[in-house]
């Protein structure tokens, strides 16, 4: 049996990390100036946005056009501008359930949760929409109002379409968040008997077994079915990390890394374990003890814990970035 002793990445990065100092700007732009300049540059460089703006100037009350422009701004990484266009569209069409949900989602994305709750409450007072839109409202309510308040909305959705697997899964996840594992597990098991390929439901059932029902072997079986054995052990390790069960997490990460050397998620989790267990963590390598196998694993650990730049410098001390 071979061992590697790993230091937490924070120590390694503090020792070897280096970067060039950034130049100091002559004047700091105000948030408004920065947004205006960014918007101008984006409009100048994006032909689609230019075209949409011109058309919107000609037809400022065109809701569909304004929503397209909002979506384009969101895709381009300007959520503040997208939000303002959605506000204007929602004011012009207050009875559009989907549009109001778009505004609610954008407000939440910008951290404006109080406003998002107000919009959601007003939207839910509108005539009931079709089940998919109501399901979307229920998911928003989960995060904005909390799972207890949102449960009845999920049940309303399911009453409209009792056999829809996504709606069943949504209710089960809501019950999971309320720490009601028996009810949630029953829903998920029934769903998987009918739809065994429903990955979200199987992932949720695995998480339920690992985090609330204390049946890690069952969790591993379900995660293996979705993403393979290495990922299954890494997922279980992540649950143990959340519970601060460091020894159990390390044991699962050993299994994951023995199955798959180059596994960034498992290595990142191993860093967390190292950072919370006195600065080091021992990894027992129970598979592939050949020199070539150990060399490959050592290289992976060197890349993750020291960084690619450090490895390059070790190979060629005269190299410069």
Image (spheres, helix red, strand yellow):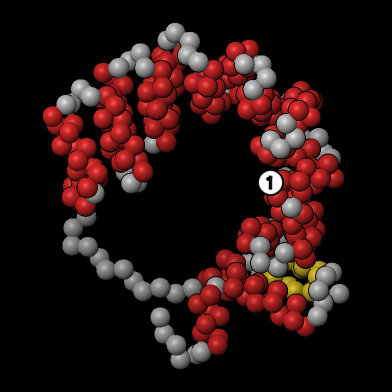
Q: Position of residue 55 (x, y in %)?
A: 17, 33
Which of the 4 image quarters holds residue 271? bottom right
User: What SS does tag 1 mark?
Assistant: helix
* Residue 118 visible here: no
Q: Residue at x 62, y 16 (%)?
A: 161
Q: In the rendered view, would you say 119 is above or below 248?
A: above
The residue tagged 1 is 242
* Residue 227 visible here: yes
Which of the 4 image quarters holds residue 265? bottom right
Q: Position of residue 303 (x, y in %)?
A: 59, 73
Q: In the rendered view, would you say 251 is above or below 216?
A: below
Decide if residue 151 is on the left or right side of residue 65.
right
Q: Position of residue 86 (x, y in %)?
A: 31, 28
Q: Quadrant of the C terminus?
A: bottom left
Q: Name the residue nearer the viewer: 27 or 69.
A: 69
Q: Residue at x 51, y 89 (%)?
A: 316
Q: Quadrant of the N terminus?
A: bottom right
User: Which residue sits furthest left?
Assistant: 58
């Amino acid at each position: 049996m071979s061992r590697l002793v790993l230091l937490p990445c924070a120590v390694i990065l503090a020792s070897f990390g280096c970067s060039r100092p950034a130049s100091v700007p002559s004047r700091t732009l105000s948030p408004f100036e920065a947004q205006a300049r960014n918007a101008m540059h984006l409009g100048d460089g994006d032909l689609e946005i230019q075209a949409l703006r011109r058309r919107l100037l000609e037809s400022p009350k065109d809701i569909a056009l304004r929503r397209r422009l909002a979506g384009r701004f969101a895709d381009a990484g300007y959520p503040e501008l997208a939000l303002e266009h959605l506000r204007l569209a929602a004011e012009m069409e207050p009875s559009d359930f989907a549009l109001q949900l778009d505004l609610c989602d954008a407000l939440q994305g910008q951290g404006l949760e109080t406003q998002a709750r107000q919009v959601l409450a007003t939207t839910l007072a509108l005539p009931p929409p079709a089940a998919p839109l109501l399901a979307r409202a229920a998911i928003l309510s989960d995060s904005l109002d909390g799972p207890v308040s949102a449960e009845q909305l999920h049940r309303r959705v399911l009453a409209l379409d009792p056999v829809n697997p996504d709606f069943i899964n949504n209710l089960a996840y809501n019950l999971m968040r309320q720490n009601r594992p028996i009810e949630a597990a029953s829903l998920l098991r029934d769903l998987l008997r009918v739809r065994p390929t429903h990955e979200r439901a199987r992932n949720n059932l695995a998480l339920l077994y690992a985090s609330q029902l204390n049946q890690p072997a069952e969790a591993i079986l379900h995660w293996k079915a979705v993403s393979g054995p290495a990922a299954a052990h890494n997922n279980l390790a992540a649950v143990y990390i959340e519970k601060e069960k460091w020894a159990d997490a390390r044991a699962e990460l050993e299994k994951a890394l023995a199955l798959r050397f180059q596994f960034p998620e498992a290595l990142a989790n191993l860093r967390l374990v190292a950072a919370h267990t006195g600065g080091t963590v021992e990894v027992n390598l129970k598979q592939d003890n050949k020199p070539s196998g150990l060399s490959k694993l050592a290289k992976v650990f060197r890349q993750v814990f020291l960084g690619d730049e450090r490895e390059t410098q070790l190979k060629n001390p005269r190299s410069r970035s």
